[in-house]
Image (cartoon, grey):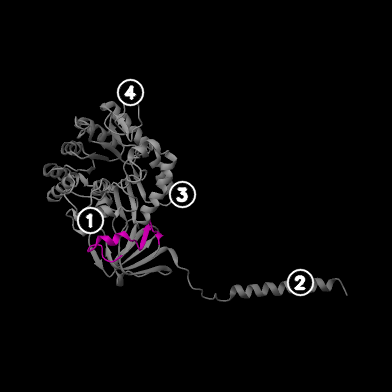
Amino acid sequence: MSPRRPLARRAGLVALLLVALLLVAAAPAVAQPAAPDSSQLLLRPARLFDGDSLRTGYAVLVRGGRIAQVGPAGQVAAPRGARVLDLPNATLLPGLIDLHSHVLLHAYNETPWDDQVLREPVGERVARAVVHVRRTLDAGFTTLRDLGTEGAGDADVGLKRAIEKGVIPGPRLVVANRAIVMRGSYAPSGYAPEVSVPQGAEEAAGLEELSRVARDQIRRGADVVKVYADYRWGPDGEARPAFTLAELQRVVEIAASSGRPVVAHAVTAEGMRRATLAGVQTIEHGDDGTAEVFRLMRERGTVFVPTVAAGDAVSRYRGWVPGQGAEPARIAAKRASMRAALESGVTIANGSDVGVFPHGENWRELELLATHGMAPAQVLRAATSVAGRVVRPDGTLGVVKAGAVADLVAVDGDPTRDLTVLRRMRLVMQGGRIVVAP
């Protein structure tokens, strides 16, 4: 056989193969079912609480981490390829917000606060916090303001960055770093004067030192500056104002220069008054708040964060059983202050002081706000749109509207009638990503 024939045959086969490939390329493509577009999701719940009011028959379209469209279900169509999620009998609402948390603490009936600060290594406390933030997110709280590391240094800043980078799951964190206390007023306390004991917050005294400490905490990564406007340093251990009005004004001035708000721990009426006049954004606790000081807060636009659940938990740890016997003085005082706050019309936002009690049970505050005089819809606003404006004044957090951050949760039932349904999350979405699937 001639050697040219195999070459000719091989060339012919190659030519046939090329013709076949050209014919396949020219043939019309066979239609394939489109894969769901993971960046677009249409949610169709039975009810929608949008951060203000309850609506029925509404749908919400999420695209790329934001809410793209909200409206009657018949007017919000699913784009081609979008995933559709029906949520029958469920209420969809904004991701919940807790404005007062301590992720580096755990329940005081497990380990006393002093022992956590003095005996637990920071590494252990951070490891616990990783668990805490996951439980909190699973419970439907997609944003937390963490108000002090309580002896754990700058660990809150590291946790915040780890969450932002996707290293660990957790709520969006707004952190206060160490917080500022008046020298000699905080805790652990009760030791001999010559013994130097690590404190749960950073001490400062006088305008110069307050200026330095505030700037330093901002440099370390604080999103807000927290100051203790009063604390238990009176002659008999009672709470008394800790800083003068001028000192509080200096902290507010420095924080404002950096574009940050100031948060004030204040339980006394005078501490609250000074903090309000100084221009703080929120006052935490307010256990002894009066009608007069709450009216001042309303006039100045200062937001009240009651933290009812903290006092309730501590009283229970000390043996109080609700409904049995007289209420402890601390509980009675909180009821009185809440009545005065509600009558004054001051803005009330949700913040629980979780860490005093177990993380993931942030819903305790919501239920207690209702037993202290707030209607369920008011409570829901306090934990969504009102708290959202504290964190982001532009109104893009804690609401369900076009352009808002796609933090959404769904629960079975109607929370405007029964807040206990918030104990069980059916769906949790953070920034458009589902973290608890139905």
Q: Quadrant of residue 420?
A: bottom left
The residue carrying mark 2 is 11
Q: Which residues are magenta?
A: 412-436
The residue under label 4 is which amino acid type? Glu
Distance from disc 2 to disc 4, alpha carbons, whole Å, reads 98 Å
Distance from disc 2 to disc 1, alpha carbons, whole Å, reads 80 Å
Camera sees residue 397? no
The residue drawn where x is 35% and y is 35% is 217
The residue under label 2 is which amino acid type? Ala
| Secondary structure of residue under mark 3 | loop
First of labels 4, 1 by sequence position: 4
Residue 72: % across, % down: 28, 69
Residue 231: % across, % down: 23, 35
The residue mark sitting in front, 2 or 3, is 3
Q: Nearer the viewer, residue 362 or 75?
A: 362
Binning the other alpha carbons within 10 Å of mark 3 as few (below 14), some (14 to 19) or many (20 upward) gives few
